[in-house]
Amino acid sequence: MNDTWTERLSEYIDGTLPDAERAALEAHLAGCTACRTTLDELRRVVARARALDDRPPAADLWPAIAEQIGVSSGAHHVVSLAERRTRRVTFTVLQLAAAAAVLLLLGSGGAYLALRRPPVEGGGAIAQRGPAADLTTSPVGWVQKTSSRYDAAVAELQSALEQGRASGRLDSATVRVLTQSLVTIDSAIVQARRALAADPGSAYLNQHLADTMRRKLELLRRASALAPART
Amino acid sequence: MLLNIAAVITLAVTQQTDTTVPVRPGMRLDVDNFGGEVVVKAWNQNSVRVQATHSSRDRIDVEVGASTVSVKAESRRGIAQMVEYQISAPAWMNLNLHGVSTDIEVDGAQGAVTAETVNGEVKCRGGSGQVSLKSVQGAVRLQNAKGHVDVYSVSEGLTLENVSGDISAETVSGDISLEGIESASVEVSTVSGDVTYEGSIKDGAHYRFATHNGDVTVGIPERTNVTVSVATFNGDFDSSFPVSVTNTTKHRFSFTLGSGSGRLELETFNGDIRLRRPGQLHDKHHDDQEDH
């Protein structure tokens, strides 16, 4: 793969490449399968990020959780993905993949908190939580940059879930199912992280890990919303 | 003797409620139930009949508002624990059904349907517009619906049959099966389970089927125009018809069928991806031969 051209693919997608360079890149693409494949993958991740449902966090427990962690749900302006799309930022290929992955995380309500939660000092809490934490000692790329905030959001939601269990609002069978499901997702996250560590440039593995992390946040968000159901 | 006494006690505390209220087109039916069952069947009358079996300590409230009919049970001790509802409602009526330890069943709806429960199955035949079915501990099954469809479970599988419209189906642990689908937008994912799809692959449309642990099997009709992207970390790809792979990276490759105007993404981290002609989708013999 031609690194020079690969680095210009995001500008090409953005439409910011000067005419001469665009023509040269298109000529290169015509003969380079690897670059065409990379371009296709980048277009896919960007398209998927753009297609995300920009739902606000669910009601129910979210105001309480937000209050708990010092976030006033009404006091902060939530920047919509539509607003974000109006900003033009040029990334390298891996940065673009990382940005798309972060946008995938933004698709869940949990990222609402993740983006506003102050970073965990030293990330100390991460190592205490489940098998997924084992591999955060050697994360790669965007995972390293986003994991502390992601884990903070996960921790807050798990705490809310635990409160729901302790207060009896969630029965033990439901908590058991949710816990087992979280173990299933954590196991998938561990496997995806291991694979990504071995092949950090894989667009598929980046997307897959982001998807799986998003699912964990989504499950926790839904579970937290269930907690008041028996009141 | 003990059984007889128990039966007598049960009969003594069980009560039947049967109430019918008139409704106008455009009204919505809201039902909240903690435990038991909610069954809603469509009928050809502009009225809602609520039949409930419940404890004599509970009271069934049927409130008719300007735009809704609200059904819920109240107990002297707070929330009524177990109520079995059999409700007849006009087919056009939008349904908004919620439960905790409740099975939910809808038959013959022609309006929007929202059905959510924590512990219980959700079955829906019919529905149009927005159709949203969710359960934490329970399978979800949707048949003969059209519109914007969103089905979700945490620990069980999802089954969709004869459904048209935009479809989103997601579970954590469970298989997802879609048959007889007419859609230009399908997004399906599970963490642990197989995914099977049989339905239309339209020009210019987008389909995504993903699992972490499981196989993905998709029926591809003849003369389909789609660009197929296949990604697997640990698994094989098998197609019952010839394909010409064009773009290949370490974990992903793609190929084009016909004009390639549609987009089909197939992903499994641990599992196989199979393309079949629709008639071969349940051909176990073919798959067994491939496995050997």
Image (spheres, coloured by chain):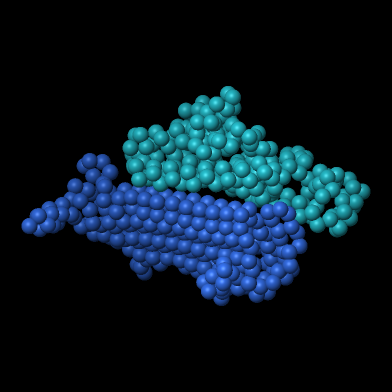
Chain colours: A cyan, B blue
The residue furthest right is A20
- In the rendered view, does A167 fall on the left or right side of B292? left
The residue furthest front is B292
Q: Tell me, yes or no, if residue B168 can be seen here.
A: no
Name which residue lies at 40% across and 51% down: B137
To which quarter of the image does residue B44 belong?
A: bottom left
Quarter occupied by the C terminus of chain A = top left
Question: Residue B112 location, x and y as percent?
Answer: 46, 59
Name which residue lies at 58% across and 37% down: A135
Question: Residue B204 location, x and y as percent?
Answer: 68, 63
Question: Residue A178 location, x and y as percent?
Answer: 43, 44
Name which residue lies at 49% across and 51% down: B172
Marks counted in the figure total: 0
Q: Is residue B258 above or below residue A174?
A: below
Q: Relative to the observer, which residue lies in front, B147 or B6?
A: B6
Q: Tell me, yes or no, if residue B77 can be seen here.
A: yes
Q: Is residue A58 above or below residue B221?
A: above
To which quarter of the image does residue A77 belong?
A: top right
